[in-house]
Amino acid sequence: MRSLTLHLKVLITLLVTVGILVTAYQIFILGIPVTEDETDDLWNIDAKVEFQASGREPVKVQMFVPPLNQDYVSLNESFISNNYGVSIKRADGNRKVTWSARRASGNQTLYYRLVLTKRYSGEQPKATGPIYRDSIAVEGAEKIAAEALLAPIRQHSADVETFISETIKRVNNSADDNVKLLLGGDASTPNKAKVIELLLSIAHVPMERVHTIRLAADIQQTPELWLRSFNGENWLYFNPDSGEQGLPQDRLVWWTGDDQLVGIEGGKKALVSFTLNNSEMNAIRLAKLTDENTDVDFLEYSLYGLPLQTQQTYQIMIMIPIGVLVILILRNLGGLQTLGTFTPVLIALAFRETQLGFGIMLFTVITALGLSLRSYLEHLKLQMLPRLSVVLTFVVVLIAVISLFSHKLGLERGLSVALFPMVILTMTIERLSITWEERGASHAFKVAVGTLFAATLAHLLMTVPELTYFIFTFPAVLLIMVGFMLAMGRYRGYRLTELFRFKAFLKD
Amino acid sequence: MFGLIKRWKALEAKGIMGINRRNADYVLKYNQRHLYPIVDDKIITKERAIQAGIHVPELYGIISTEKEIEKFDEIIAGRSDFVIKPAQGAGGDGILVIADKFEGRYKTVSGKIVSQEDIEHQLSSILTGLYSLGGHRDRALIEYRVTPDPIFKSISYEGVPDIRIIVLMGYPVMAMLRLPTRQSNGKANLHQGAIGVGVDLATGLTLRGTWLNNKITKHPDTTNAVDGVQLPNWDGFMKLAAGCYELCGLGYIGVDMVLDEEKGPLILELNARPGLNIQIANDCGLTHRAHAVEARIAELAKNDVKESAEDRVRFSQQLFGHVKPAEI
């Protein structure tokens, strides 16, 4: 729009930019879902620990549980265990739960349940790890075999990363005699890991075992072993069987290190089995849940931080600018005549309580009756204020009668005429009757129809649930709207109706 | 859709001003809000005009409270014709024109007999703000009844025709004669069905007219041609209108005037948001003319010159005048 002054241009640009940036930040950085229907994966992980208690001595079961400093956010964690005391301690980046009981016998079952989701995880702490280690001492044939293996590895690698993957590849080459010797006939993954560790230690490359659980529903699984090494900045993950680098998205690190998953005192035959299932959850509810469980309180300062009751009120209130925008467009661009500027918005709000069809009917009937009473009172030559008072009282009685009748007829809709629509109706009649006095009946009728039309359109837009959700969740959108409204403030083009009004000019 | 865009372009080329443009570029830009009371209240307008030596219909009295309604007889003492008006009324609503007294009752211009009681009710309605903008309390004024110049007899139906001139920063830009019709009940308001007839600024000759947004050449009630009528004392009207800028300080106004049989041109009221139908009446857009005036003002400001009302009228007449009545 060429007629905008610089000041206004700057202001509009500023508002729109801030609006877009804040909204984009909410959507892309905070990951707040754009629609209410958006759902997110929610993982339910059960670890069942079974063992036989000896019965003679106190029982102490120790098990690793996920450290929860990863990309996942735990929503709920519970330890289901009768008569056992539970304590959790952190050590070396791991978390360990200890169940203890003074006396227990027979088959025992303990449960650990974790509910987690991937979205909304907060910022990760900076990773640290060792970058040097001493060599593991080896002697004799093993030493020669290891060195024979390391020579080509050194040759084929450029840095730590390629060195490790090359090592893993070599170790997995079962045809190699040196490898055969080092593995000693045991080609299981843990054993391979041991050989890999040995080889890496000779080159002074530290390596750590990572035990992961696969986030996949309904499959039998045991913790999967991965290796990782710190390159000074990040942890690099390797699959010990294939040399493949990088931990897949669906792996959840359960614990790290060489220890067994579960340790038991005063019992035997400890067995851990995992059951996973996933469910979907409404994304915004999930966001609220995660917000409570993490220190990323991004929803704290949004409208979701308000008490529920207040939230509902705001969900209505925040849509008022949309209604106002509709009126603005209809009036300034369309040239529609309405009763007052924002009466249509109020009527649109009243429709919320009466429903659209019934609302329009009610509005029409009551306004028509109110106006006909008013024109009858005209003959009595009353002053304006007393006459309006009579009209308003009549409207109240009328609404009461309608409510009563529709209730008797079993139409509960009629009872929806609450205080709010009534006030708006009486106000509308007052304004309409003034218009009638000043501008005549035909103008009043035109204005009334225009108002009803604008109110209907505004109501329809204001009650689109997706829109309500969007604006409530991303209130910065309102700034963009204000920018548009400001620009409209200098709109100088024709209104649609003027194109018809001035048609006579072009009839030559 | 495509036709509408073409129509838009055509209207813009003709310089037709729309409401949005009027509001944004003229009303908001040139009319300071704190000056509005001067034009919105006819009593203040009148006082100002009298001070400035501009002719207005004589004020007989003001009624501002219910109690003062009793003073009504005193105000009209001996007079048989007068007009009752709300001070802040708009669009000619609430105006009662009494032409004669008849056996203790009054007779309006249209021949309707009204009683003293009716008049008092009307006064009281005005006071409660029935006719005022936004329903504020108002005052009623009782003033001289204008007797229209006989020149209008053939092209007007009852009522008093008035002349509106749009004045931008003291420069008359466009003029229109408003003729009451049967449909407008003798009122000179276009939205109530009165006819608007364009007037050539230089000569005071009437052009064709507009009625209900259509172009016309004949008065629907009298069937006489409305164009080609020479308005008497045209320069007087122009000077009166141009002087209203100094009177109220508003830069974009519509000045409504009447031609009284005896007293000549009189100011009736000023309007801070004059309507746009004057363009149809003149078959000419306001935008080009307004731009010409704005260019003139900018030029004068550069040379630090101030023009008198006469100069401004001359400028307008030279630039916008001598429009030939279109042939049909």
Image: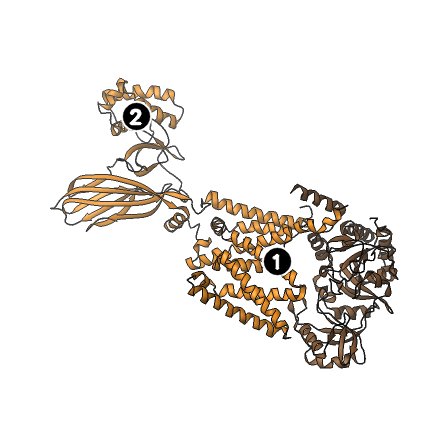
Chain colours: A orange, B brown
Q: Earlier in the sequence, mark 1 or mark 2?
A: 2
- Say above or below: A166 vs B28: above
Provide the secondary structure element on which disc 1 rests.
Answer: loop
- Say above or below: A435 vs A320: below
Q: Residues within 10 Å of mark 1 (few under 14, many from 20)?
A: many
Numbered circles on residues, count = 2
Type of the residue with mark 2:
Leu
- Say above or below: A141 vs A318: above
Q: Quadrant of the C terminus of chain A?
A: top right
Provide the secondary structure element on which disc 2 rests.
Answer: helix
Q: Is residue B242 left or right of residue B30?
A: right
Q: CA distance from mark 1 to mark 2?
A: 84 Å
The chain containing the residue under callout 1 comes to A
| Rendering coords of residue A254 (x, y %) | 30, 39
The residue where tag 1 is placed is A338
| Res B167 seen here | no
> Are the numbered discs 1 and 2 placed on the same chain, yes or no?
yes
Looking at the image, the residue that sits furthest to the left is A56
Q: Residues within 10 Å of mark 2 (few under 14, many from 20)?
A: many
As drawn, the label of residue A199 is: 2
Which sits in the foreground, A217 or A290?
A217
